[in-house]
Amino acid sequence: MNNISKIENKIISINDSVISALKQMDGHRTKLVFVFDKDKFEGILTIGDIQRAIIRQANLSDPVSAILVKDKIYASENDSLEQIKTVMFKELIDCMPVLNADGEIVDVLFWHDVFTEKVEDNRPKIDLPVVIMAGGKGTRLKPITNVIPKPLVPVGDKTILEVIMDQFEGIGCKKFYMSVNYKADMMEFYLSLLDHKYDIEFFMENKPLGTIGSVSFLKGKITTPFFVSNCDSINEQDYRDVYDYHVNNHNDMTIVTMVKSFKIPYGVIETGEDGLMVSLKEKPEHTYMVNTGVYILNPELIDEIPEGQFFHITHLMEKVKARGGRVGCFPVSEEAWKDMGEWPEYLKMIKVL
């Protein structure tokens, strides 16, 4: 097969677990793997396939075969390059296997192979308001936050605040509301000096109001679904996918969650009455969904946040669920989310970026 070197670290067995496929994607910084049953090509598994499977409550310890979508678009060796390019562009396909009559891969074309010139993102933009929660003191990042507020901590040649806002602007979001308190003047001054001017409306949180309490000040200002983001993490996920899920699932609120797995390096024994062994699991792996601090909220939820009172986002989640509302979770992989809440995470983040 031509270009085999391009996919040799992206190959997985159809009998491997879904969580192992997710870890392989993270480990090689890729959003897809090629699934084989021994030497037979079975299909491509993407991060989107895994995300949709998690939303459907799939078991991540199940084999890849349980979630593999078989009706994806693949090219034939009889197709011309122009035909393949047309399909890739129309369907926004990042990777196109080229198959022979026996279903064997004879070539693989990646987006950067066939579109050497810069191609504009033709996916529809979404212009939703974004609320940035930037009022915290960043005590876990002292002593640097004794000097500058956490949103202005540098990540590469930008501050984390700029990285977050640039990501939202990249999908079409223009209007930002920023909850500020600690060193607010410094943040406003810094942003005013930038060549790129963000459309930001600052609002002051004069006393600590929890992780969502200050959003009560925006009553009457936001009339569409809107994003809420903390200011200490970066997520590689295209938030348009999260918005599509939010709308299609008719959620009141959607939480962006990170898939975190822990493997216990021992045999775990479950016991019953009289201390008798019931079962033994050798080195079990447990998977959890971790809150990343990014959300989509419907505008009417602002009315459910008490004015001027300490109120966490978890309180709002419980309130919505108690009245029978829908709180959805959109999963992202572990390596797609970078946190800088504490020094070890920050140092890891800047090394990656």
Image: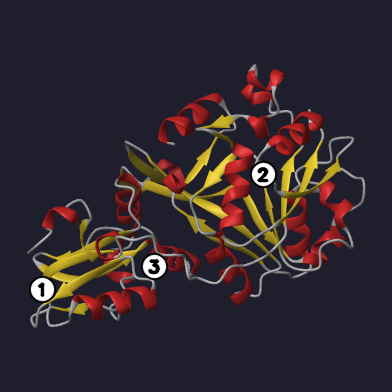
* Mark closest to the chain's N terminus, 2 or 3: 3
Real-space CA distance between mark 3 and mark 1, rounded to the nearest whole angstrom = 22 Å
Q: Is residue 304 left or right of residue 90?
A: right
Closer to viewer: mark 2 or mark 3: 2
Residue shown at the point (50%, 55%) measured from the top left: 237
Q: Which mark is residue 104?
A: 1
Q: Amino acid at mark 1?
A: Glu
Residue 265: x and y in percent read: 32, 36
**Mark 1 residue element:** loop
Q: Which mark is residue 159?
A: none
Q: At 79% across and 65% down in the image, what residue appears?
A: 299
Q: Residues within 10 Å of mark 3 (few under 14, many from 20)?
A: some
- Name the residue tied to disc 2: 230
Percent from the top left, x then y, of residue 36?
Answer: 17, 65
Cα separation, mark 2 vs mark 3, equals 27 Å
Disc on the earlier residue, 1 or 2: 1
Q: Position of residue 118 (x, y in %)?
A: 38, 60
Numbered circle sitting on residue 49:
3
Q: Quadrant of residue 224?
A: bottom right
